[in-house]
Amino acid sequence: MPNFLETIVAQLKRASGRVVLREIHGDRFISVTGRELLDQIQLVRLFLRSSGAQPGDRCALLAPNSIRWAAFHLALMAEGAIVVPLYFRQAPPELVAMTKDCRPRLIFVSDAALGDSVAQAWPDAPRRVLFEEALQGSAPHPRLPDVPNPRQDSDIVTIIYTSGTSGEPKGVCLNVENLNHMLSCTTERLNQLMGATREPDRVFHYLPFNFAASTILLLSCLSRESVLTLSTDLNKLADEIRLASPNYFLNVPTLLERVRRGVEEAITKRPALIRSLFLKSRAAWQRLHVGRGRVNDTFWLALGRVLIFRKIRDRFGPHLRALICGSAPLAPETQLFFLMLGIPVLQAYGLTETTGICTLDDPRVPVEPGYVGVAITGIEMKLAENDEIVVRGPHIFRGYWNRPEETARVLQDGWFHTGDQGEVNVRGNWRISGRIKNLIILNSGHNIAPEPIEEKLARLLPAVQQVVVVGNGRGYLCALVTGAVEPAAVQSALDAVNPELPHYRQIREFTIVDDAFTPENGLLTANGKLRRDAINARYSAEINAMYDSKAVREAASRQHA
């Protein structure tokens, strides 16, 4: 059996004269064929040999997504180097921490400023090499063999640093076996989605390649008959999607929920007739979807599809078959919204340590909103103590770089402990309910997962950017809220949510903070997850004030009584 690298090289040879990768720049494309990409890979491999790089050396990639990123990624793996993909918008101190941890021989950068940002924070940083420097010249004659250097299943091919939601990021070591298995699983699912088609898959991508799921998507596309289109300007994402006209693309919940809110807000500004039709057709779809349709529902739904839903769907181009969503649970309301438009959203669940994926919705069966699909082929998943999801199989990483104690803590008796709480239904579909380490333990002893409460409040507050529930070691819960929102709106949302919750899970106080949480200010990870410890530390005064003010009011109330 060829390994994943050999499969990709063979596919690029078959696509010698066909476009396999392209970047969107405004209204035009920059493209490469399979042969042109192999030529770039050849140049990078020659540079590596001339620089003295040896198999097993770590080499970092620090750049935005591009065709050249893909060429460097493949060339490094083909030469036996270990690829360390880094996020180009990461704060320099965090980049330095990662590079000091893995000690790369070379850091390849797309422009000098990125390399300088590391050097300023770490004067003894390894050699920085511009992409252009390694790609100078033309493809060599005679060529190096296209077949990659022999790799064993246990050989590490990449170190991907985790987001670091609580503490320093850890380098996850993925080997040949991990990627071989994962690409076989993604190929299976994508074949199920695309069916018997003679046209190459049309795929769009905007998420950074330093994420495990993005790496898997890149390698999956290059191993299939695909045309992968890369975004270059997130401010023009809607236009880029229309130009790319994809069959499918990978998303995070934030974008899909923003699309839903944007559509619903736009409808409120349309003439009364359109607003009324949207509401009637949406209500009709919701009743029909659960088998409770009324006499006129089919009529209203057909009218809504022709006059409204189809126009919204057309924004994604005429070829869209599905959206794929991961990194965090998607709100059921959002998944149902896209299903109403005729766009299934296939949810995935996984971690960097599981080579990006553990579950993925089967496109041949109806999705279950709120669930993240069934386990992929060849792996095992079960619930352990505290409903923690544990997993084992050929997709599980073999350890953290230079962290044997951390590795031993999460890998026990062959099972990887995910730290996620969940449940599985009779159909084999999994639901993720929260992170064990995020549990808030009140001084009453109640254990509370904050994520479901935060998600409910966020859905009721479209203008809010983040909701963070706090209260560890306290007597009750409070919340920090960011975004352009009025206190009355937050209170109204609490009044709607609190009665549905037991007393110990109700939010008693809140504070609106001016600054949004971002990766740049250290309060979000690179893929948008909350860094709760950092948030609690940064806003300790505001959190203490919420508890102090409520205590004062309660004392005054008792005194008055």
Image (cartoon, grey):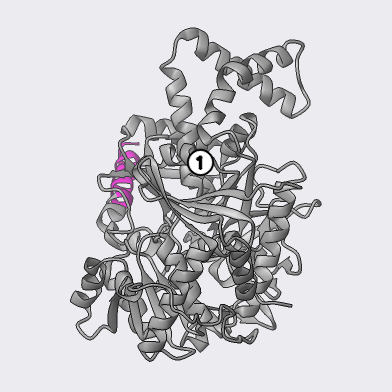
Q: Residue drawn at (77%, 55%), measured in percent from left and top?
A: 428
x, y (%) of residue 513?
28, 46
Tell me the quarter of the picture where residue 52 sits: bottom left
- Residue interval drawn in magenta: 546-561
Query: For the residue carrying disc 1, how many other residues have a C-alpha within 10 Å: few (<14), some (14-19), or many (20+)?
Result: many
x, y (%) of residue 39?
47, 70
x, y (%) of residue 343?
62, 36
**What type is the residue that disc 1 sits on?**
Leu
Residue 291 in view in this figure? yes
Which of the image's four quarters has the C terminus?
Answer: top left
Q: Characterize the magenta stretch by its predominant secondary structure.
A: helix
Residue 165 in view in this figure? no
Position above or below: 65 against 272: below
Q: Residue drawn at (37%, 35%), measured in percent from left and top?
A: 463
* Nearest the eye: 355 or 513: 355
**Identity of the residue furthest to the top in this view:** 273
* Nearest the eye: 235 or 219: 219
Position above or below: 397 against 227: below
Position above or below: 139 against 190: below
* Nearest the eye: 28 or 84: 28
x, y (%) of residue 380?
74, 69
Q: Residue drawn at (43%, 41%), measured in percent from left and top?
A: 240
- Disc 1: which residue: 256
Looking at the rendered structure, the secondary structure element under dot 1 is helix
Which of the image's four quarters has the N terminus?
Answer: bottom right
Q: For the image shown, how many numbered marks are present on the structure?
A: 1
Q: Report whether 184 appears left or right of 405.
A: right
As for residue 337 lying within the magenta part, the answer is: no
Position above or below: 267 against 498: above
Q: Report whether 385 appears left or right of 259.
A: right
